Image: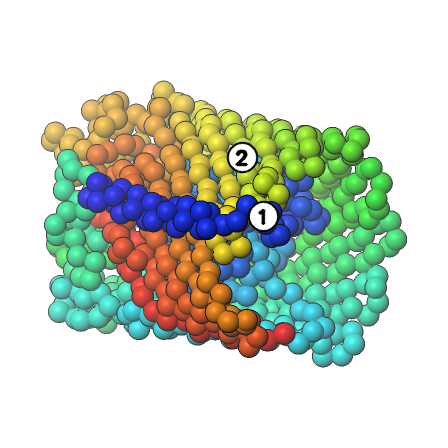
Amino acid sequence: MRTHKLASLALAVSAAFSTSIVAQEAETIQKKETALEQITVTAQKRTQSIQEVPISVATLSGEKFESLFSGGEDILALAVRVPGLYAESSNGRVAPRFYIRGLGNTDFDLAASQPVSIIMDEVVMENVVLKSFPLFDVQQVEVLRGPQGTLFGRNTTAGIIKFDTVKPTQDLEGYAKAGFGSYGTMNFEGAVGGGLTDELSARLSVLSQERDDYIDNAATGQKDALGGFDEKAYRLQLLWEPSDDFSALLNVHGRELEGTASIFRGNVFNKGENGLNASYDRDTVSYDSDLLGTGADNNPQEYDGFGTSLKLEYDMDDVTFTSISAIETADGYSLGDVDGDSIASQNFVTQDKLNDLEQYTQEFRLSSNTTDAMNWQVGAFYYDASFNVTSVDGFFGATTVFHDNKTWALFGQTSYQVNEKLNITGGLRYTHDDKSLIVGEQNVDGFAVLIGFASVQEYDDIHVDDGQMSYELSANYRVTDDMSVFARYANGFRAQTIQGRDVAFEGSPSVAEAETINSFEVGVKSDLLDDTLRLNAAAFYYTVDDMQFSAIGGGNNFTALVNADKGEAYGFEVDAQWLATDELTFTAGYSYNHTEIKDDTLTVAPCGTSADADFTGYCTVLDPRADGFSASIDGNPFPQAPESIFNFTARYTVPMGDDGEFFIFTDWAFQGETNLFLYEAVEFTTDDNFEGGLRIGYENFEHNYTVALFGRNITDEDNVKGAIDFANLTGIVNEPRILGVEVKYSFY
């Protein structure tokens, strides 16, 4: 299997670069008149060229971004598409888990804290459900690697993924796009915007993604029982500009999701072996759970969300005042036959309900608006979120835990242009974080009872709070007009975390102490070959003190927060874009990331239970067994941290008359060795995963339409993305191959 995958990838790369050689041989020696487009980012909350920002930043936009979602994919499609960025989930199309430079959180609980922050239209989406809001009508995605706590706060020790949607203008413009693919996949997306009055403009954007159920349930005999989804989303933006000095942008958005949660596939690994076994069948599972009393659960999932934000901006000559107020709400549930099998002794099914999620954020900011050598900004931030999670299972009934989190912060950053070559930036932020957990009563067959551990009152009100300073110092030096180098030191922290998941299974809540990161990076950014080659690279080293981890699974399926004494990582990223000819463009990226847990006393429960006579469990544990059972994880890599990532795209066009072109676009992504859990086991390591996409079509410039055939996961790879280790060798795999056709019409 590994040889087959590598051979397929090598063939694709070879074919793409062979095309490049042929195209270059046909090119005359005259100088090209084309150049790469200049990219601007708002990584430092002001518009700058990506080549001037002293941060390792990668962007996604245009065809490269849109192609990823042509087959109905959700936000997880971004995984491995940027060097250093990974994402996965065991909660279907909600609650994604993101990782940057190996730093993330494998916790599947709906209250999990993540060190990667998601910013959508300048609003932080803190809860894991909010992070999954569908992506459509997006102007640009920015991936900021490394701690960003000075300006953004809210647990950004790993980095930020920042989404900016297309904003209203006075010009009438928009688009409509429709796609049809395998398994009844249908995608509709569109937007229309323009001026309503001389001072007021609007833009309405909508999305509909559907897929039929295609997976059979062998245990019940149901055909096409699960695997589908139906997601609808919208966004309305109103921009009021009564003068040149003032603007108000209102954003109202919502979503409705109904479909299948994650597909857990039982016994798809053989003990002592790596990779999917012969019993794995993408189109078949065997579920016998009936928690809802409907005959067969088939892992249903439903979520609703609504949010609104108001951005006010007032230009006071040399200073600009900005206010961003936002409210986000969500409700829903997911049910999972977690063991993924119909074997009675292993039957384990749970349903988690997110109730009454409300998140309120407020940011005030003052920033300089001059051409002076010194630029600055100061601000204040407030965050208030509350929700409760009800967990239902077939053993202990229903248990509810109530979460509350309040945060406030003061921040400032300044940059000074020392001379025409050197710019220095420094920033400070003080953040105070306050969290509480209240454990409710358990309900069994309509009767409220106390849960089984010592006394529920002992955990009625768990409260933690912490305040710390974050800071950074960076420098950017322009070596030539086309090349600059930068260095950056950043310190950040992730506040204490409370985990109430185990309450549902007669366990105790757990608390992790705050973690602190110190990150160092150096890099180079360059535009070469008459601005036809953009080559950016960065090398990094960071340490995390009191690193927070989630010990998940084991024989008792507990989910407990733990602190490792230290975590360490080093590596590098390379981002490249090359306009080889007027007709041929390449992008490529590579990252290497070495991560290591450093704690010679920390152990976790691996697969199986301590009651096993030989302590062998269900898998082949490679770590030392501290007490004959518990696995020592000192020296292990961080979980779900790919050691390497490689991706590339190629686009080739052929002019068709004076007003159109035929194009071929392909994108490929490769994921290196990845350990799925804190402990190491033969069965729970992946390597050489890759996926490819292809678009072949015609674009007409005069009439602004595109018709294309597309394919996602075109080689139909079966890639393991996650696993469940407590009952049997259960795996989670990627989406199947989707082939289809897409039509898009734009108007200006």
Relative to 396, residue 239 above or below: below
Instruction: List the single residue furthest toward the bottom.
Output: 196
Q: Nearer the viewer, residue 44 or 303?
A: 44
Q: Does any portion of residue 439 appear in the rendered image?
A: no
Q: Secondary structure at mark 2?
A: strand
Relative to 302, residue 103 above or below: above
Identify which residue is drawn at 18% across, 71% down.
223
Relative to 529, residue 387 above or below: below
Residue type indicated by callout 2: Ala
Q: Secondary structure at mark 1?
A: loop
Relative to 626, residue 89 above or below: below
- What percent of the width, then of the height, locates residue 534? 56, 42
Q: Earlier in the sequence, mark 1 or mark 2?
A: 1
Left or right side of 306 for 215: left
Residue type indicated by callout 1: Gln
Q: Nearer the viewer, residue 430 or 504?
A: 430
Position of the C terminus by quadrant: bottom right
Q: Which residue is mark 1?
A: 30
Q: How many marks?
A: 2
Q: Nearer the viewer, residue 269 or 405?
A: 269
Position of the N terminus by quadrant: top left
Crowd tier of the residue under label 2, counting other residues whose Cα lies within 10 Å: few below 14, some 14–19, many 20 or above: many
Identify which residue is drawn at 36% across, 57% down.
693
The disc placed on residue 232 is none
Identify which residue is drawn at 21% across, 31% down.
621
Q: Which residue is mark 2?
A: 537
Disc 1 vs disc 2: Cβ atoms closer than 8 Å? Answer: no
- What percent of the width, then of the height, locates residue 50? 63, 44
Q: CA distance from mark 1 to mark 2?
A: 30 Å
- What percent of the width, then of the height, locates residue 364? 74, 51
- What percent of the width, then of the height, locates residue 410? 71, 42
Identify which residue is drawn at 13% across, 64% down.
218
